Image (tube, helix red, strand yellow):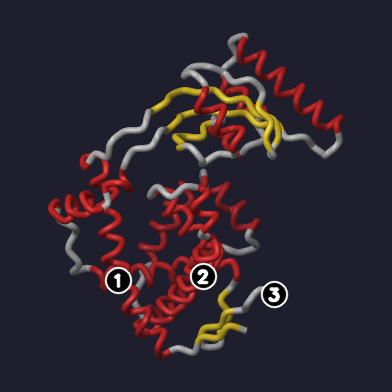
Amino acid sequence: MQTTVKVNGQVISREAIQFELERLVRFYAEHGMSQEEIREQLPDLVKKATDQAIGAKLLMDEAARLDLQVTDEDLDGEVAKIVDQVGGEEAFQRALQQQNTSVKVFREQLKRGRRVDKLIEQLVADIADPTDAEVEIYFNEHKDEFTKGERVLAQHILISPDGDTQVSKDEARAKIAAIRERVLAGKDFADEAAAHSMCPSGKEGGSLGWFSRGMMVPEFDEAAFSMKVGDVSDIIETQFGYHIIYKTDHEPAGEADLSQASDKIRDLLRHARRGERVGALVSELRDKAKIEFV
């Protein structure tokens, strides 16, 4: 049974906890944690996401108590950014309909979020950025973490069977085989991916970006790393269906390099320092709040 979390009598929605979990997963993935490591640590990440959702609620309530001002012009600018990000006004309106909400409600939610942003901006305004010396010290103490692993850049096309029957599997395999023949005959891989791939990456021409060993399922991983750059793979069967891969680049493993790692380290240190300051405020607010797990 899932636990319901209440802060001062108000329920924290499961959507809020899921949102925090997805943010955590993205952050750790962007900073080098493999998908396998993320899966292993998922229970701890869920607990951390729950704590962060509680903290977000406490910060939202504190920002409201302080009545931090968010102007209509500020909101207009934020809405304009979001409209642009989702692909225009029509796409924005569709997204609101899918979420069963209105522009008025959306702007009110956005206003609460901007109040929290302003609270945090005030809280961390006097925190200095990490110096070059501090970045170098961190790098030297954690050099193994920044050793560059072997990576592949590739595109793929996925065709999934529409059922568990052999007929469905045969049809899916025949479809991916026909696509592969067209690619080998000169058709553009990205165009074929956009037209036929059943993976969300199809919208991006099948691009998977750079990935390291262990980030993909084993059958896919083995094929991608053993191929030559510029080759199109044979048909690969995985739990998701049938794939073909077009390998566009390959980087071997290498020694850690401070110049390449410095931005990531600076971001980590900056995030840690600001997190400590925000965490101290959340702890103070949490001590005063009534937190229930029911």
The residue identified by callout 2 is: 47
Location of residue 220 in the rendering, given as x and y in whole percent from the top left corner: 59, 32
The furthest residue to the top = 185
* Residue 243 horizontal side relative to residue 9, left or right: right
Location of residue 282 in the rendering, given as x and y in whole percent from the top left corner: 37, 79
Location of residue 106 in the rendering, given as x and y in whole percent from the top left corner: 53, 64
Q: Earlier in the sequence, mark 1 or mark 2?
A: 2
Q: Secondary structure at mark 2?
A: helix
Crowding at dot 2, Cα within 10 Å, few <14 / some 14-19 / many 20+, comes out as: few
Res 104 seen here: no
- Alpha carbons under labels 2 and 3: distance apart: 15 Å
Task: Identify which residue is drawn at 50% across, 66% down.
Answer: 44
| Quadrant where the image shows the C terminus | bottom right
> Above or below — where is 107 with respect to 284?
above
- Alpha carbons under labels 1 and 2: distance apart: 18 Å
Q: Earlier in the sequence, mark 3 or mark 1?
A: 3
> Above or below — where is 285 with respect to 31?
below
| Quadrant where the image shows the N terminus | bottom right
The residue identified by callout 1 is: 276
Q: Secondary structure at mark 3?
A: loop
Identity, as a three-letter code, of the amino acid under mark 1: Glu
